[in-house]
Image (cartoon, grey):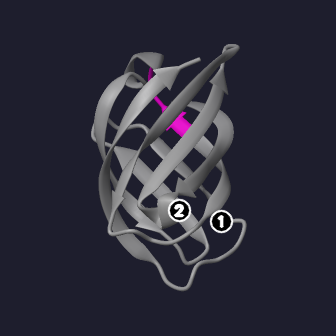
């Protein structure tokens, strides 16, 4: 399993998210929607993946956000996790869909 450090943050009051990781001098950005919305959050994060080929296209995502930690796992097995910079009121199980972009 490979790892990369980066960050993840909420957008639109927790209805959307954006995560960014630098792998071999390429920025991988995973952004998408969350249901239910969880409010504002941000976190330094770790991405775990088997192969960079996992980090492309659109992917379903599920996980838990809050109260002090987040974990999001894509349908093909990559996982984003981290400690929230500011705890949110309660933990929520979330589902959604995201898309990988390279910069």
Q: Which corner quadrant holds the C terminus?
A: top right
Horizontally, is 71 left or right of 83 in the view? Answer: left
Residues in magenta?
47-51
- The x, y position of residue 90, in whole percent, is 49, 84
Name the main secondary structure of what is drawn in magenta. strand
Residue extending farthest bottom: 89
Name the foreground residue: 36 vs 94: 36
Graded by Cα atoms within 10 Å as few (under 14), some (14 to 19) or many (20 or more), the crowding at tag 2 reads many
Residue at 38% across, 33% down: 99
Q: For residue 37, which quarter of the picture? A: bottom left
List the residue tagged with mark 1.
84
Horizontally, is 33 left or right of 13 in the view? Answer: left
Name the foreground residue: 74 vs 103: 103
- The x, y position of residue 6, in whole percent, is 68, 39
Residue at 38% across, 24% down: 54
List the residue tagged with mark 2.
70
Count how many numbered circles sit on residues in the image: 2
Residue 51's place in the image compared with 45, above or below, is above
- The x, y position of residue 78, in whole percent, is 42, 37
Whether 5 is among the magenta residues is: no
Residue 31's place in the image compared with 101, above or below, is below
Residue at 61% across, 36% down: 20
Q: Earlier in the sequence, mark 1 or mark 2?
A: 2
In the rendered structure, are the residues bearing label 1 and label 2 in contact, judged by CB atoms less than 8 Å apart?
Answer: yes
Residue 13's place in the image compared with 27, above or below, is below
Could you tell me how far apart the alpha carbons at marks 1 and 2 are, in whole angstroms? 7 Å
Dot 2: element = strand
Residue extending farthest front: 12
């Amino acid at each position: 399993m490979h790892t990369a450090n980066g960050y993840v943050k909420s957008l639109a009051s927790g209805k959307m998210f954006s995560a960014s990781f630098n792998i071999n001098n390429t920025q991988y950005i995973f952004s998408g929607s969350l249901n239910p919305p969880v409010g504002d959050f941000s976190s330094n994060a770790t991405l775990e993946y088997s192969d960079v080929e996992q980090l492309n296209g659109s992917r379903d995502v599920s996980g838990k956000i809050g109260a002090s930690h987040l974990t999001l796992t894509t349908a093909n097995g990559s996982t984003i996790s981290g400690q929230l910079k500011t705890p949110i009121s309660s933990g929520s199980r979330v589902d959604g869909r995201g898309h990988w972009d390279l910069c």
